[in-house]
Image (cartoon, grey):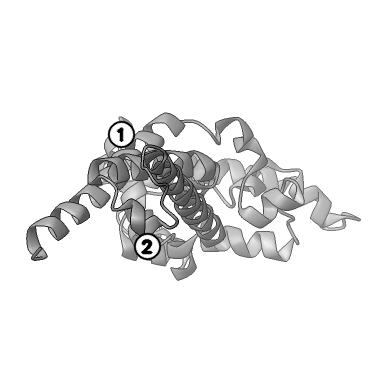
């Protein structure tokens, strides 16, 4: 499930993988607005973005017949007043809470819940199917044919572990798109003032109804299955090791 720990982990990974200088590398003599200091510590105001925003707003007529539509046509409304800092500048819990609010720590919770539900359902159903197939395969060579699974006897721990690994890979493939949507949403910085502006202007989320409900952005449609091979391998290895360790511990600790 999506949690503050996953949000902080993802943003620290973005920081480690990014080569761009962060806000701490800016000269200390740069002027910092008190409001920016309150919203985000150690962040230096981008004067160029602020100047561009002011120049865009200055051309608006106060007697405009449709001020809301005119504001939505300006590019600054896509990110708010000025460009927000990057994900590598907002990676601490206090920074996230001060700039984006405490709700941002559980951002895109719905995608995480759907991902975990699909993963759990596919994993256990696939594992049960493989288990019954292995029991049936083992019972084929028995004479007379067993009438129940108890008569077949226990399966090999290695076979059960491999079945768990296959189930983990299948479950990871089925739920990978929602995991990508969750990760992408956690890397987006949405300041509190931007959220208020969108609420004030009644900003509708883009995409189809299913995409809006599951938290998938329409621009990420071609990226939903990126990295699916690595996640399948990770889930397969983790499931195999966990199940194999369980059977190994039972074999060593439980007296026969």
Classed neighbour count for the residue bearing mark 2: other residues with Cα under 10 Å, few (<14), some (14–19), many (≥20): some
Q: Is residue 21 left or right of residue 191?
A: left
Indicate which disc residue 4 carries: 2
Residue 131 in the image: x percent, y percent?
Answer: 41, 48
State how many labels appear. 2
- Are there few (<14), some (14-19), or many (20+) residues within 10 Å of tag 1? few
User: In this orientation, which residue lies closer to the viewer: 227 or 49?
Assistant: 227
Q: Residue furthest front?
A: 144
Front residue (pair 20, 139) = 139
Secondary structure of the residue carrying numbered label 1: helix
The residue positioned 61% from the left and 47% from the top of the image is 216
Depth check, front residue: 254 or 47: 254
Q: Residue 222, position in %: x, y?
A: 60, 30
Q: Is residue 126 above or below residue 40?
A: above
Question: Cα distance, mark 2 to mark 1?
Answer: 20 Å
What is the quadrant of the N terminus in the image?
bottom left
Q: Position of residue 138 (x, y in %)?
A: 36, 41
Residue 153: give its label: none
Q: Is residue 207 left or right of residue 69?
A: left
Q: Residue at x 44, y 59 (%)?
A: 2
């Amino acid at each position: 499930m999506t949690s503050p720990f996953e949000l902080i982990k993802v943003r620290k990974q973005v920081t480690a993988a990014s080569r761009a200088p962060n806000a701490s590398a800016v000269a200390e003599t740069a002027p910092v607005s008190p409001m920016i200091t309150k919203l985000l510590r150690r962040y230096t105001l981008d004067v160029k973005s602020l100047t561009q925003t002011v120049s865009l707003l200055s051309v608006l007529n106060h007697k405009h017949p449709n001020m809301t539509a005119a504001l939505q046509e300006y590019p600054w409304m896509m990110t708010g007043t000025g460009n927000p800092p990057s994900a590598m500048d907002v990676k601490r819990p206090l920074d996230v809470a001060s700039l984006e609010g405490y709700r941002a720590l559980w951002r895109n919770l719905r995608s995480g819940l759907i991902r975990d539900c699909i993963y759990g359902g596919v994993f256990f159903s696939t594992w049960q199917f493989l288990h019954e197939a292995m029991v049936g395969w083992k019972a084929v060579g028995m004479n007379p044919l067993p009438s129940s699974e108890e008569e077949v006897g226990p399966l090999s721990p290695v076979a059960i572990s491999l079945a768990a690994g296959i189930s983990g890979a299948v479950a990871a493939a089925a739920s990978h798109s929602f995991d990508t949507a969750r990760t992408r949403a956690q890397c987006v910085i949405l300041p509190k003032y931007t959220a208020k502006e969108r609420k004030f202007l009644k900003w509708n989320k883009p995409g189809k109804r299913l995409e809006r409900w599951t938290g998938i952005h329409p621009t990420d449609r071609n990226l939903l299955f990126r990295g699916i091979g690595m996640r399948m391998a990770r889930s397969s290895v983790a499931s195999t090791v966990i199940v194999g360790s369980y059977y190994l511990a039972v074999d060593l600790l439980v007296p026969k």
